[in-house]
Image (cartoon, rainbow, N blue to C red):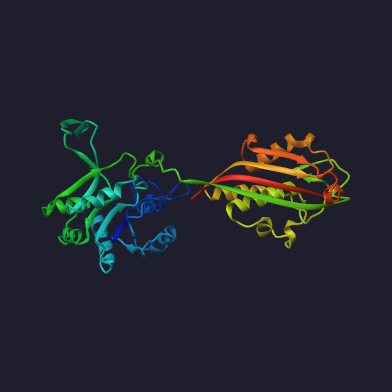
Amino acid sequence: MDVVALLMAGGQGTRFGAPEPKQYLLLAGRPVLRHAAEALLAEGLVHAIQPVVPAGDEARVAAMLEGLPALPPVPGGATRAESVRAGLAAVTARAPDAVLVHDAARPVVPPGTVAHLLAALETHPGAIPAQPVSDTLKRGQDGTIAATVPRAGLFRAQTPQAFRLATLQAAHATGEEGTDDAELLERIGLSVALVPGAESNIKITWPEDLTRVTLPAPLLLPRVGTGYDVHRLVPNRPLVLCGITVPHTLGLDGHSDADVGIHALCDAIYGALGEGDIGAHFPPSEMKWKNADSAQFLVHAAERIKARGGRLINADVTLICERPKIRPHVETMRARLAELLGVEIGRIGVKATTSEKLGFTGREEGIACQAAVSVLVAE
């Protein structure tokens, strides 16, 4: 079954009171309508999104939906019904088997909702998710209660609402207006099925609604990365290791401050993310990194984890040298690395070993470091 969802983003959201339409506001760093589109597509039952937007906003919305199977946005009309008809006209040539109509201001489509709607279409011309009314309802007049409205059999309608393409086209052919598309089917005598709605399917109408939205937690997958770095010991250079200056007669030679501990740790993080190595992000050929404080490299690596929706689980650093003695500085190093990475110190391990006077480290010609990290990254 080919299923296309009309993403209704043509409203101005005047009740919300923001300087721009509420569907464009950021929620957890992304536009509300982007969340709504991703929620519709999450279970693989919707094959394309047809955005319906305010005239002139087509390019803006297309950019917000970049990377998703979204058809070119079309301008809506002066009313919701006119906007739905514009969306239907845009998908008519594709002739999908079913059309969903969804409010772009509803960023959460609970799992199973779309499946229930499509199953209901096998026996009904249309289907909507709905929640039974639980509050006592009052009809007001002049600031007082005029009557209590019986709530038995009353439901709160939600979206997405599902219809066969021809059915929805026939309902809109009357040219009438309705508060939702199900109402138009009711008017031409067609039955609309009710499937379970959910409290999490919030329509953002008022500013406080943004705080009520609970987005599904992303699936975080574990990643492991390793890093290794070496720098030569030379005179007349400070010895910077794991973000601190260690007293010593020699320092490490390099384009930046040559902090072998941070360099190995950065490589481990970039490797876990599949984003190359430290040289790809901070090329030694660029003079702006000459004698640079490597702390900024580690801050950048930490920001890359956050940008991927992830978090650092732990980091382990092993310095390999004969001298200086590292143990007296371990706690200071751990604290500094934790500060730069934005995690508690318990997630950071720093230790040292010698090479039993073998090789270049044994001859005190240089210092080596190996590092390992584990991170969780959004799928």
Say whether residue 360 is left or right of residue 5.
right
Say whether residue 69 is left or right of residue 373.
left
Say whether residue 52 is left or right of residue 281.
left
- Give how far across and how far down residue 127 sits, in percent: 21, 50
Front-most of residues 339 and 135: 339
Where, quadrant-wise, is the N terminus in this rendering? bottom left
Front-most of residues 123 and 360: 360
Task: Locate residue 65: give its quadrant.
Answer: bottom left
Front-most of residues 47 and 147: 47
- Give how far across and how far down residue 25 sits, in percent: 42, 49
**In this view of the protein, can residue 21 be seen by the observer?**
no
Q: Residue at x 20, y 32 (%)?
A: 138
- Give how far across and how far down residue 232 sits, in percent: 82, 53
Say whether residue 157 is left or right of residue 312.
left
- Give how far across and how far down residue 272 sits, in percent: 60, 51
Q: Is residue 178 above or below residue 146?
A: below
Q: Is residue 59 above or below residue 356?
A: below
